[in-house]
């Protein structure tokens, strides 16, 4: 090899960002899929009913009572005082706030009554109990 070839080489002062952008897009897609899967809700075994309504407004708050008695408000764990505080704030923004209660079929009835009493105390009148339709 000639000595002159070594001196003719130029230093590359650019960084190829295409692989970095590809990585950013892949991470964005993974994040969107993961968040979408996490927001689907809490899995509970709903009681069965002959007629189950299917219309829910987008502003509806969902209260889920799991089999172990844990209370969720839109997939976030809350205590009864936190639930009351958050529902008061939501009701202040929307006086006609619709709420649905999804209680596991094995949950103690007193837990559901406690949530229903809170709805009455907050004067939330648009209330629904979520069930699954009986398959015949």
Image: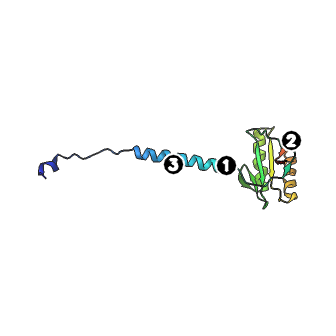
Q: CA distance from mark 2 to mark 3?
A: 43 Å
Task: Please identify the quarter of the rendering in which residue 89 is found.
Answer: top right
Q: Closer to the N terminus: mark 2 or mark 3?
A: 3
Label 3 belongs to which residue?
27
Which marked residue is nearer to the observer: mark 1 or mark 2? Answer: 1
Q: Residues within 10 Å of mark 2 (few under 14, many from 20)?
A: few
Q: Nearer the viewer, mark 2 or mark 3?
A: 3
Q: Circle 2 — which element?
A: loop
> Do callouts 1 and 2 mark residues in contact (Cβ within 8 Å)?
no
Foreground of the two, 52 or 116: 52
| Near-viewer residue (68 or 79) | 68
How far apart are the two marked residues, 3 and 1, measured between alpha carbons? 18 Å
In the image, residue 118 lies at what x, y percent?
85, 50
Label ID, residue 39: 1
From the viewer's side, name the closer residue of 85 and 20. 20
Disc 1 residue crowd, few under 14, some 14–19, many 20+, Cα 10 Å = few
Q: Are marks 2 and 3 in contact (CB under 8 Å)?
A: no
Q: Secondary structure at mark 3?
A: helix
Whether residues under marks 3 and 1 lie with C-beta atoms below 8 angstroms apart, the answer is no
**Residue holding disc 2:** 125
Expressed as whole percent of the image width and height from the top left, the position of residue 100 reads: 80, 46
- Residue positioned 85% across, 54% down in the render: 112
């Amino acid at each position: 090899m000639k000595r002159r070839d070594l001196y003719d080489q130029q230093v590359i002062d650019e960084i190829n960002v295409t692989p970095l952008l590809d990585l950013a897009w892949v991470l964005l897609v993974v994040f969107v899929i993961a968040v979408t899967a996490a927001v689907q809700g809490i899995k509970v075994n709903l009681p069965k009913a002959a007629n189950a309504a299917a219309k829910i407004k987008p502003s509806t708050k969902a209260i889920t009572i799991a089999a172990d008695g844990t209370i969720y408000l839109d997939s976030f764990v809350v205590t009864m005082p936190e639930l009351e505080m958050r529902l008061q704030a939501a009701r202040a923004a929307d006086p006609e706030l619709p709420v649905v209660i999804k209680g596991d079929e094995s949950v103690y009835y007193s837990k559901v009554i406690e949530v229903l009493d809170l709805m009455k105390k907050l004067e939330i009148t648009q209330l629904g109990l979520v069930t699954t339709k009986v398959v015949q």
